[in-house]
Amino acid sequence: MLVLGLETSCDETAAAIVARQSDGSGIILANIVLSQHALHQPYGGVVPEIAARAHVEALDGLIKEACVACGRRLSALDAVAATAGPGLIGGLLVGAMSGKALASVLGKPFLAINHLEGHALTPRLTDGLAFPYLLLLVSGGHTQILLVEGVGAYRRLATTIDDALGEAFDKTAKLLGLPAPGGPAVEHAALRGQPARFTLPRPMLGRAEPYFSFSGLKTAVRIEAERHAPLDRGDIADLCASFQAAILDVLSDRLNQAIDTLRRQNRLPEVLAVAGGVAANRAIAGRLTELANENGLRLIVPPPALCTDNGAMIAWAGAERLTIGQQDGLASPTRARWPLDPEAESAPWAGAKA
Ligand code: KG4
Ligand code: ZN
């Protein structure tokens, strides 16, 4: 089964072709990602209108590139999948419309994919993981612990009540004058820093409620940065290392809490997986390795290029859905908001981000 996947929900334009074998394994035949970071850099954040226009300009070229990269014609495809939400609506419309047009011309099924489902199913593409598994999903817009029970069956166990983890990295980078995307910049600077130099808060540590919170941590970094201004390279490295140390403690604590709850309920899976852009962080992977060992779990961390946004995860989610007989009509909507677990209660004070 050959599926084209299109991703345009934020500031990466991506097209990929993935094959799903009859034994259920996946092979990435082409995976082209074009970052718009340079376009948004002058504005200090992603400008939705600029993003949508850049997707329009790039997407058909990327689809062609993907075909050329693996020597397949569009007519060889079995389906076309595109991210239909959640994300910036202009970009989503570009990707979904392109996908629908292609599917309709080719006479093949179209699949409207939830971007978070693309992240959530990535460990099955990279490692052939069986259901169920525990998933830490950490991206620029979401921070959740999920029990992944099947395709389309996601139980949300924890979520953030304010900023997403990637957003906390990005805002911290910005206030320290580091370039976008902030996550890799903070991770890199932290390598040279002293994690014990600044005492930063560990929001939600030890709390029974299944929530994350990062906005206070980001504010604490800002206060320390202002107190020590002007910052030299060493200060910035120490702040990044101290920030990342706080993040590691919070992630371990929240995951341990979810694991303990599942263990008490006899529902703890054997595998912990991590997905989303922040999962590309090596320090986080290191701490999760310790946590998995302590809890007798197997840890799956996809390669960095499949943690950050890409088309392969969308193609794969499409292949997974098509395999169980699903497809979407050409009238299917694009959705700026689209929770993975529709039954999860909205978190207190969480606004649009839960
Ligand atoms: O999944 P993703 O590519 O896009 C969204 O769905 O949001 O995640 C992007 C986020 C950004 O906030 C970026 O700074 C963060 O992932 N990120 C990282 C790293 N690489 C990307 N955060 C921490 N460490 C990294 N190495
Ligand atoms: Zn993403």
Image (cartoon, helix red, strand yellow):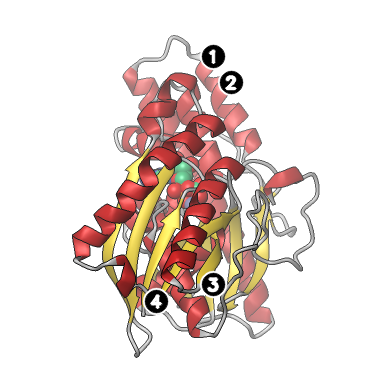
Residue 198 vertical placement versus 128 (above, below): above
Residue 31 vertical placement versus 267 (above, below): above
Question: Residue 241, located in which quarter of the rendered image?
Answer: top left
Amino acid on which the number 1 mark rests in the picture? Arg
What residue would you read off at disc 3?
134
> Alpha-carbon distance for marks 3 and 2?
35 Å
Residue mark closest to the camera, 1 vs 3 = 3
> Alpha-carbon distance for marks 3 and 4?
31 Å
Dot 1 or dot 3, earlier in sequence: 3
Q: Which mark is residue 227?
A: 1
Circle 3 crowding by C-alpha within 10 Å: few under 14, some 14–19, many from 20: many
Residue 244 drawn at (x, y percent): 45, 41
Amino acid on which the number 3 mark rests in the picture? Leu
Residue mark closest to the camera, 3 vs 2 = 3
> Alpha-carbon distance for marks 1 and 2?
6 Å
Residue at left 36%, top 63%? 302
Dot 1 or dot 4, earlier in sequence: 4
Residue mark closest to the camera, 1 vs 4 = 4
Residue 95 vertical placement versus 263 (above, below): above
